[in-house]
Image (tube, rainbow, N blue to C red):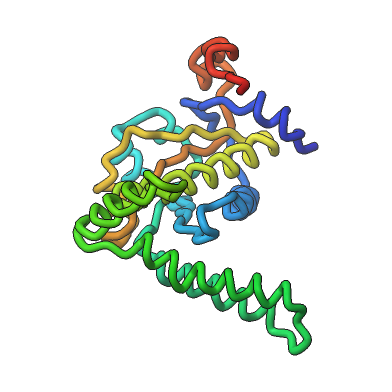
C-alpha cells in the first residue's frame, strides 16, 4: 500500500547503504514520470532524467561519485540534468501546444486574449530573458532592469548565472517529486552533491550545454547501516516566519 504524502515525507531519508535486493526498473521509471510533472519555470521543463541500470555504467558512475557508499551499493542511479540550452526548443513546444488547444473556430474573446498573451510570452519575453552572448547581454539586461526597477516592480534575474539557477531550481523540484514518489512505494534514495560532474557528463555522453543537477542513488535501505543516525533538523521556529 502506497504511503500518503505526509507518510512519504516522514519515511524519506538519505540512504547511504542499500540491501542487495533488486528494485523494479518500471516502478522507478514511473517515479521519474512523476518527476516530470513537477512545477517548472515558464513550463520550459529544462531537464532530463538519466535512469542508469547498466552494471558497467553504474560502476563508472560510482567512481565519478567519489566512491560514495550511496552510489557503490545503489541498485540503480538517476542523474538529474539541466538543459538550459534547450530553451528555444521547449518554448516552441509550448507554442505548438497552445495553438493546438486553442484551435477552435468559435473561440471566445477571453480565450483569444489568453492565447495571444501566451504566444507573446514565448515569442518575445522568453527570448528576451534567455538570449545571451558570453554573459554580456545578460549583464546589460541586468543593468537596464535594475534601473527600471527603481520605478516599478520588475523581474531582475536576467544574467547568465541567474538563468542557470532558474534551471537548477526547476530540476531540484523534479528531483524531490521523484524521491518522494520512491519513498511512497517503499524505495529509498540519496541525492549526492559530491561527484565529478565533468566525468558524469562524459560517462553519459552529454552535450556541452547539459549540467549535472544531482546524482541519486536508488535501492532499499539496509536497516542496520543504511541511515547514518537519527534525523536532525534545526528547530522549526528558527526557520518559520509569519508576516
The spot of residue 196 in percent (x, y) is 26, 40
The spot of residue 63 in percent (x, y) is 29, 39
- Horizontal relation, residue 114 to residue 171: left or right: right
The spot of residue 114 in percent (x, y) is 65, 70
Specify the quadrant of the image occupied by residue 72.
top left
Q: Residue at x 26, y 60 (%)?
A: 208
Residue 237 in view, yes or no: yes
Q: Residue at x 40, y 28 (%)?
A: 69
Q: 121 above or below 1?
A: below
Residue that protrudes farthest toward the front in the picture: 151
The spot of residue 124 in percent (x, y) is 44, 71
Q: 217 above or below 139?
A: above
Residue closest to the eye, 190 or 123: 123
- Horizontal relation, residue 93 to residue 145: left or right: right
Q: Residue at x 74, y 89 (%)?
A: 105
Residue 230 in view, yes or no: no
- Quadrant of the drawing holding the N terminus: top right
Amino acid at each position: 500500500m502506497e504511503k500518503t504524502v505526509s507518510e512519504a515525507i516522514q519515511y524519506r531519508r538519505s540512504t547511504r547503504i542499500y540491501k542487495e535486493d533488486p528494485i523494479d526498473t518500471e516502478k522507478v521509471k514511473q517515479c521519474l514520470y512523476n518527476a516530470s510533472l513537477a512545477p517548472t519555470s515558464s513550463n520550459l521543463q529544462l531537464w532530463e532524467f538519466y535512469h542508469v541500470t547498466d552494471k558497467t555504467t553504474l560502476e563508472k558512475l560510482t567512481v565519478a561519485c567519489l566512491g560514495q557508499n550511496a552510489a557503490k551499493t545503489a541498485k540503480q542511479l538517476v542523474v538529474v540534468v539541466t538543459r538550459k540550452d534547450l530553451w528555444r526548443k521547449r518554448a516552441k513546444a509550448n507554442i505548438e501546444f497552445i495553438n493546438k488547444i486553442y484551435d477552435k473556430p468559435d473561440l471566445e474573446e477571453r480565450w483569444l486574449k489568453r492565447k495571444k498573451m501566451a504566444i507573446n510570452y514565448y515569442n518575445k519575453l522568453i527570448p528576451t530573458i534567455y538570449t545571451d552572448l558570453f554573459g554580456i547581454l545578460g549583464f546589460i539586461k541586468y543593468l537596464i532592469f535594475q534601473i527600471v526597477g527603481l520605478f516599478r516592480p520588475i523581474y531582475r534575474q536576467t544574467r547568465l548565472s541567474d538563468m542557470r539557477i532558474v534551471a537548477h531550481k526547476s530540476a531540484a523540484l523534479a528531483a524531490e517529486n521523484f524521491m518522494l514518489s520512491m519513498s511512497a512505494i517503499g524505495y529509498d534514495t540519496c541525492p549526492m552533491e559530491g561527484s565529478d560532474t565533468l566525468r558524469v557528463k562524459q560517462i553519459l555522453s552529454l552535450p556541452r550545454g547539459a549540467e549535472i543537477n544531482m546524482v541519486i542513488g536508488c535501492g532499499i535501505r539496509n536497516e542496520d547501516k543504511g541511515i547514518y543516525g537519527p534525523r536532525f533538523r534545526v528547530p522549526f521556529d528558527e526557520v518559520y516566519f509569519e508576516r
